[in-house]
Amino acid sequence: MNYNEIGKTGMRVSNLSFGASSLGGVFHDIREAEGIKAVYTAVENGMNFIDVSPYYGHYKAETVLGKALKEIPRDKYYLSTKVGRYGKDGINTWDYSGKRATESVYESLERLHIEYIDLINVHDVEFSDMNQIVNETLPALVELKKKGIVGHVGITDLQLENLKWVIDHSEPGTVESVLNFCHYCLNDEKLTDYLDYFESKNIGIINA
């Protein structure tokens, strides 16, 4: 397994990592025991980066992942989760307020059975008022970083233009990583147009 650092975070993560949305039954129903075993297998075979969100399965993914993480030494993985997108009883909800972001982090800690989150992301900023992301959501997460509750702060989105806008309008160093999806694959390489920009800002890139 090859490992690379995410930007300047100091986190050297496996090139192939574990996306835990499937633990929430996002794509199809799962057997919980098999999902937990998949987490064990991934970590045992060198995957040391796990990405999840309260939104995946409307809290189910974090809940199932948390059951697995209770049995894995904390120094064996880096954990990434998110704030901003949620849901309950099949209904999707969005809340990018600083208050909800802070509450969400502590709720995730409980579901995941961990004491700190290595990387906290603002989930899919395209659904937000991006001014709120800059002026409220990100500052709330930075405060949690100062307290040692989270290690690093990032943002995610499908639209690369939105990621750049948030970075350009935030205090330098606030955004330490971006997660972008569907733009670095066989039929779409749009992400390559932004690589130099992200590198110039010392921002790590997670391709999903």
Image (tube, rainbow, N blue to C red):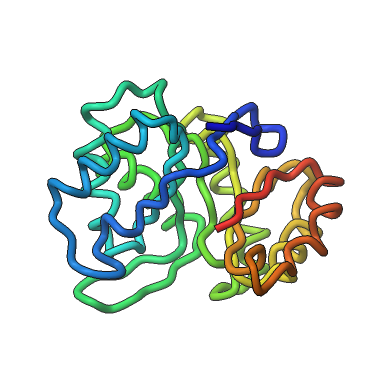
Query: In front here: 95 or 85?
Result: 85
Query: In front here: 144 or 5?
Result: 5
Q: Quadrant of residue 172?
A: top right
Residue at figure coordinates x 55%, y 48% from the top left:
140
Q: Position of residue 108 (x, y in %)?
A: 33, 46
Query: In front here: 88 or 194?
Result: 194
User: Where the C terminus falls, by quadrant?
Assistant: bottom right
Residue pushed farthest bottom?
91
The correct choice, above or below, for 196 with respect to 149 in the image is below
Left or right, residue 170 beside residue 64: right
Residue at figure coordinates x 19%, y 39% from the top left:
67
Residue at figure coordinates x 32%, y 21% from the top left:
73
Q: Position of residue 35 (x, y in %)?
A: 22, 49
Q: Position of residue 162 (x, y in %)?
A: 70, 69
Q: Position of residue 184 (x, y in %)?
A: 66, 63
Left or right, residue 55 beside residue 49: left
The correct choice, above or below, for 18 with respect to 114 in the image is below
Residue at figure coordinates x 64%, y 27% from the top left:
10
Q: Quadrant of residue 122?
A: bottom right
Q: How many marks?
A: 0
